[in-house]
Image (spheres, rainbow, N blue to C red):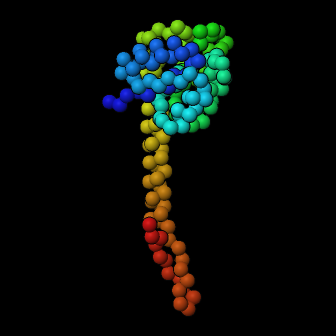
Amino acid sequence: MQKTHVLLVDDEKEFVDSMKERLDLAGYSATACYDAEQALKEVQSKEYDVAMIDLIMVDTDGITAMHRLKLFRPLMECIVMSGQGTLRMAVEAMKQGAFEFLEKPCDHKLVTQTIDEACARKHEQDKRIRRAASKVFSKLEQAMVDVTFAEAGQFGSTKEVPLKK
């Protein structure tokens, strides 16, 4: 089975490094980013299943970072975390599209469970999109076969000629 790719975005280097190490040991492929700009460059070059983003960072807030990352990876699920989180912040993060809001310090079992749930939702969305795209392509292919056009013949007659693929 393919490893789940997790992007960690937090300006607290010790927290990110510790989380990366624990996730790698648990069988995930984790990448550490210490600011939103680094994370933005990362998602432009690599596919990620899940991003874990700190809500309060020096260069930006987690919700803005989440929106910017999703411009490049719209199906990537985002888990927002904070050590200073309030219920209002958690609700706002969820309204803005976060899969989940976790309080730091994060319980490792809860983190892995949340990542697995987020990844399952992403894969389900991927499947639905592939099925829908397959139906569209099948209809387009059938339409191409069915399309004919009139070609003006000699003496004003017309004949139907099938459109070639």
User: With respect to residue 160, does 70 lie above or below?
Assistant: above
Expressed as whole percent of the image width and height from the top left, the position of residue 8 reads 51, 22
Expressed as whole percent of the image width and height from the top left, the position of residue 90 reads 62, 15
Left or right relative to 13: residue 63: right
Toward which corner of the image does residue 54 lie, by quadrant?
A: top right
Whether residue 92 appears in this view of the structure is no
Whether residue 50 appears in this view of the structure is yes
Q: Residue furthest left?
A: 1
**Along the line of sight, which residue is nearer the eye, 42 or 119?**
42
Expressed as whole percent of the image width and height from the top left, the position of residue 88 reads 67, 12
**Along the line of sight, which residue is nearer the eye, 33 or 91?**
33
Residue positioned 66% across, 22% down in the render: 59
Q: Work out which quarter of the rendered image holds the N terminus and state it.
A: top left
**Along the line of sight, which residue is nearer the eye, 132 or 87?**
87
Residue positioned 46% across, 13% down in the render: 18
Residue positioned 48% across, 40% down in the render: 129
Residue positioned 57% across, 14% down in the render: 12
User: With respect to residue 88, does 136 lie above or below?
Assistant: below
